């Protein structure tokens, strides 16, 4: 989706103490690409057949899920002429609002839904037929970023972030990540003021005290990982440390790292180095580090997006073990796939007990796993 790549050449080597990331362009990854192709085909078939008659997945009042499913199908090679995709896009088009947003009229998640729908329409925009809609949705999202236009001072932890939507909503890292993905899909450059404001918010979601993060939480954990939000007193879904720090966890750390890369940070930036250090220390494809099985499929797609954005094929963990992340993630996903092609998280938090949502996340992750695997 994004033209920018992490600025490394044939071999990447980032060292933070004994922690290492590396990539070799000729590295052979071990997973059978044909198995992954079959897994993706099963998942695609499940989503094509689980669509409701009205064109939605799961609920007509939740266009965010429908948008994620369509996006997952399109990035995995399903054409825009596919019957399920066509029907879904028609339905999403019906959610276009006079303010340019794309959301269910009574939704409390207008920002989130608009960002996801923009990604879906961008993936489908082969002939420019959705360009006007994308432009209007982009403008809608920009107006709802927490910044000076919201009477928010740059010193406020909310500054630069994006939330779900509606009046008193506070920003969080997850929504800001989708907001940033949507802006970049809409054509924003790394030096776009909205992107750089988002980068400030991202920095304040990191457990790292720097000139970019002097919030009250910055130094309490200081491990380089990320948490949910510094706003409204701060929150981590992994809980607090005894000194009141906000614990870092996997899905937010990969989300934060990915977004910092897309916002233009390079390998030698202390924020990137610290995030890489956390990731290599807590590398896992079996759990969402810090949350175990909670939010696992969301974690998988953020994991895959971040490591792909890094341009790395191999992660060397804190013990010195090398991991072909694409192969390991693909094997883990395939081991969890049901016979009908779907995925379901038995730890049903954040709606991952919903097979449409979990399968969309898993299919997005498999798309990134397939980038360099042998056929």
Image (tube, rainbow, N blue to C red):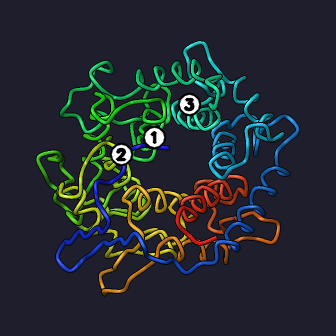
Q: Is residue 3 left or right of residue 347?
A: left
The residue carrying pointer 3 sits among few (fewer than 14), some (14 to 19) or many (20 or more) residues within 10 Å by Cα, namely many
- Residue at 60%, 34% (x, y): give it: 117
As drawn, the label of residue 262 is 2
- Residue at 70%, 74% (x, y): give it: 35
- Residue furthest to the top in view is 98
Q: Is residue 217 left or right of residue 296?
A: left
Q: Looking at the image, is mark 1 or mark 3 earlier in the sequence?
A: 3
Quarter of the picture containing the C terminus is bottom right
Corner quadrant of residue 55:
top right
Q: Which residue bears the numbered disc 3?
A: 114
Q: Looking at the image, is mark 2 or mark 3 earlier in the sequence?
A: 3
Q: CA distance from mark 1 to mark 2?
A: 8 Å
As drawn, the label of residue 181 is 1
Q: In front here: 335 or 212?
A: 335
Which of discs 1 and 3 lies nearer the camera? The answer is 1
- Residue at 22%, 55% (x, y): give it: 271
Under tag 2, what secondary structure?
A: helix
Under tag 3, what secondary structure?
A: helix
- Count of numbered marks: 3
Q: Looking at the image, is mark 1 or mark 2 earlier in the sequence?
A: 1
Compared with residue 284, is residue 66 higher up or lower down, i.e. above or below?
Answer: above
Q: In front here: 64 or 85?
A: 85
């Amino acid at each position: 989706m994004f033209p920018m790549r992490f600025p490394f050449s044939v071999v990447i080597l980032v060292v933070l103490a004994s922690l290492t990331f590396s990539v070799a362009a000729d590295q052979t990854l071990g997973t059978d690409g044909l198995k992954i192709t079959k897994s993706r085909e099963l998942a695609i078939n499940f989503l094509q057949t689980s669509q409701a008659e009205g064109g939605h997945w799961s609920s007509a009042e939740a266009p965010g899920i429908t948008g994620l499913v369509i996006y997952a199908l399109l990035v995995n090679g399903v054409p825009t002429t596919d019957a399920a995709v066509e029907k879904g896009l028609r339905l999403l088009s019906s959610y276009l609002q006079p303010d340019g947003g794309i959301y269910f009229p009574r939704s409390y998640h207008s920002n989130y839904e608009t960002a996801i729908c923009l990604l879906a329409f961008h993936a489908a925009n082969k002939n420019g037929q959705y360009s006007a809609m994308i432009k209007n949705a982009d403008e809608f999202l920009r107006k709802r970023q927490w910044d000076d236009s919201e009477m928010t001072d740059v010193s406020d932890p909310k500054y630069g972030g994006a939330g779900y939507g509606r009046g008193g909503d506070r920003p969080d890292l997850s929504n800001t990540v989708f907001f940033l993905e949507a802006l970049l899909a809409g054509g924003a450059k790394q030096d776009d003021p909205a992107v750089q404001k988002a980068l400030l918010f991202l920095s304040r979601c990191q457990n790292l005290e720097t000139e970019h993060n002097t919030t009250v939480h910055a130094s309490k954990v200081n491990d380089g990982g990320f948490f949910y939000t510094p706003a409204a007193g701060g929150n981590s879904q992994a809980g607090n440390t005894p000194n009141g720090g906000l614990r870092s966890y996997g899905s937010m750390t990969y989300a934060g790292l990915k977004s910092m890369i897309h916002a233009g940070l390079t390998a030698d930036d202390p924020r990137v180095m610290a995030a890489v250090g956390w990731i290599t220390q807590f590398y896992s494809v079996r759990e969402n580090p810090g949350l175990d099985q909670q939010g696992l499929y969301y974690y998988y797609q953020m994991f895959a997006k971040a490591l792909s954005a890094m341009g790395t094929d191999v992660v060397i963990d804190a013990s010195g073990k090398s991991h072909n992340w694409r192969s390991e993630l693909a094997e883990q996903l395939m081991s969890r796939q049901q016979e009908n092609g779907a995925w379901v998280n038995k730890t049903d938090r954040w709606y991952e007990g919903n097979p449409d949502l979990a399968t969309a996340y898993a299919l997005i992750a498999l798309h990134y796993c397939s980038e360099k695997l042998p056929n």
